[in-house]
Image (spheres, rainbow, N blue to C red):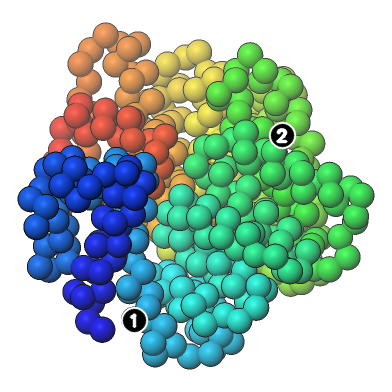
């Protein structure tokens, strides 16, 4: 069956469903949708946007779910027709991840899910797809993939716990901090009663502390009245995470785990400033000195180690914004830190870091205009516009900030 016929049939099915849901006749439905009753289904099978929007309202479905039903499903079916067996597809998806080919990885993972024959295989495919979406910075899609995997029954407990930790991290990246903290702490309590025995469980346990610690650290910005309490909780979890990642790195010979431990250490520096255990100036000096290791991001420091220094820059910006009273000093520190974080984010194609970079850029500009009283221009180039647009699509909490940047900035040619 050709794609056009499939889409026409699926649109017709949705229209019938809408009639049943509302108890309407075909004529009543057509009137609500603003269409002739005889022309509800276009010849191409592709409805116009206004029809999709009106139909989503009639069905009480999100627009994206209507689109997914009409479009994505038939693509998955056509892929499945020539699919290989699950193990081959899963291995191809794993190799695509290693090569950073995340679009291909997402496609292969969907094919693997289609041909999977057991709950464990379907959950593995969902986790692979979540990894692809994570690489593309599409964390809302990560949530969908992991939740689909967690709905499978009969999945091994250690794999399910790993899915939970990945779910917590996706919430953290999206600034859904109540959810990320709750899920990660639930895992921490589990491991207190059931100490990890396998390498997978040990990594999951360390990751749970990592997400919980950084969730508490981020909450300081949201609930400043609880800053010391939240900093203490962050420090407790990040110390555990750092220790465990360093142990795992040594035992497994995995340098990437050392990079994650280094991110924990940067978060500990921020927490110590909030707790009054070190001064902002001393903390910023240590963070800035650490960046000497990545003066040139094209050199030997790569992967999680390079990423850790990008987060050090963001931690430094947080410290400067909260604790530096001298505006000139604040602006100098943030200029250096945001520029380096931007460089690292682009080197790694890290969308979560880009969200923080542009948020910090805008906050710095607001502080400068507010403190001086001058109309200081906010200048971005065409590459920035492209990245801001992508960041707005990936992070709902950034959209208002993104629009403010685009509306207030002077755009120059990036070439």
Quadrant in which residue 381 is drawn: top left
Residue 234 shows which numbered tag? 2
Residue 160 shows which numbered tag? none
Q: Is residue 223 visible?
A: yes
> Is residue 52 found left or right of 355 in the rendered image?
left
| Residue drawn at x 55%, y 37% as measured from the top left | 176
- SS state under label 1: helix
Q: Where does the image place residue 291, in percent across and percent down from the top left? A: 53, 47
Q: Give 44 or 283, whichever is nearer the viewer.
A: 44
Image quadrant for the C terminus?
bottom left
| Residue drawn at x 69%, y 44% as measured from the top left | 183
Quadrant in which residue 283 is drawn: top right
| Residue drawn at x 78%, y 64% as measured from the top left | 157
> Is residue 177 found left or right of 104 in the rendered image?
right
Image quadrant for the N terminus?
bottom left
Using the image, determine if residue 115 lies above or below residue 7. below
Crowd tier of the residue under label 1, counting other residues whose Cα lies within 10 Å: few below 14, some 14–19, many 20 or above: some
Residue 78 shows which numbered tag? 1
Q: Is residue 357 visible?
A: no
Q: Where does the image place residue 109, in percent across and percent down from the top left? A: 49, 74
> Is residue 187 found left or right of 83 in the rendered image?
right
- SS state under label 2: helix
Report if the CB atoms under discs 1 and 2 are less than 8 Å apart: no
Using the image, determine if residue 381 lies above or below residue 109. above
Crowd tier of the residue under label 2, counting other residues whose Cα lies within 10 Å: few below 14, some 14–19, many 20 or above: many
Q: Where does the image place residue 85, in percent across and percent down from the top left? A: 53, 90
């Amino acid at each position: 069956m050709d794609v056009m016929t499939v889409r026409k049939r699926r649109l017709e099915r949705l229209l019938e469903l809408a009639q049943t849901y509302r108890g309407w006749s075909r004529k009543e439905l057509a009137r609500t949708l603003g269409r002739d009753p005889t022309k509800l289904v276009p010849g191409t099978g592709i409805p116009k946007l206004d029809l999709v929007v009106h139909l989503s309202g009639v069905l009480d479905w999100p627009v994206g779910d209507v689109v997914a039903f009409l479009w994505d499903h038939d693509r998955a079916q056509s892929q499945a027709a020539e699919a290989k067996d699950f193990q081959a597809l899963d291995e191809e998806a794993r190799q695509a991840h290693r090569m950073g080919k995340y679009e291909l990885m997402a496609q292969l993972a969907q094919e693997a899910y289609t041909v999977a024959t057991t709950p464990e295989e379907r959950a593995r495919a969902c986790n692979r797809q979540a990894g692809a979406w994570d690489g593309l910075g599409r964390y809302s899609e990560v949530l969908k993939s992991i939740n689909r995997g967690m709905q499978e029954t009969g999945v091994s407990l250690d794999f399910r716990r790993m899915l939970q930790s990945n779910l917590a991290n996706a919430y953290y990246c999206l600034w859904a901090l109540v959810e990320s903290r709750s899920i990660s702490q639930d895992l921490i309590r589990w491991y207190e009663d059931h100490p990890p025995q396998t390498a997978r469980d040990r990594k999951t346990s360390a990751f749970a502390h990592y997400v919980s610690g950084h969730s508490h650290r981020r909450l300081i910005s949201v609930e400043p009245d609880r800053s010391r309490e939240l900093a203490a909780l962050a420090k407790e979890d990040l110390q555990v995470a750092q220790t465990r990642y360093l142990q795992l790195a040594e035992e497994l010979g995995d340098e990437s785990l050392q990079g994650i431990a280094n991110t924990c250490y940067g978060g500990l520096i921020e927490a110590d400033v909030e707790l009054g255990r070190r001064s902002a100036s001393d903390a910023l000096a240590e963070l800035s000195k650490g960046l000497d290791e990545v003066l040139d991001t094209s050199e030997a420091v790569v992967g999680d180690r390079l990423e850790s220094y990008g987060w050090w820059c963001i931690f430094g910006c947080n410290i400067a914004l909260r604790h530096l009273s001298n505006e000139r000093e604040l602006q100098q520190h943030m200029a250096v830190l945001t520029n380096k974080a931007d460089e690292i984010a682009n080197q790694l194609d890290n969308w979560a870091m880009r969200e923080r970079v542009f948020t910090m850029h805008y906050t710095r500009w607001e502080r400068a205009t507010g403190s001086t009283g001058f109309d200081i221009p906010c200048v971005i180039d065409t590459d920035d516009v492209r990245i801001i647009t992508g960041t707005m699509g990936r992070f709902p909490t950034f959209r208002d900030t993104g629009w403010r940047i685009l509306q207030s900035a002077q755009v120059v040619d990036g070439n």
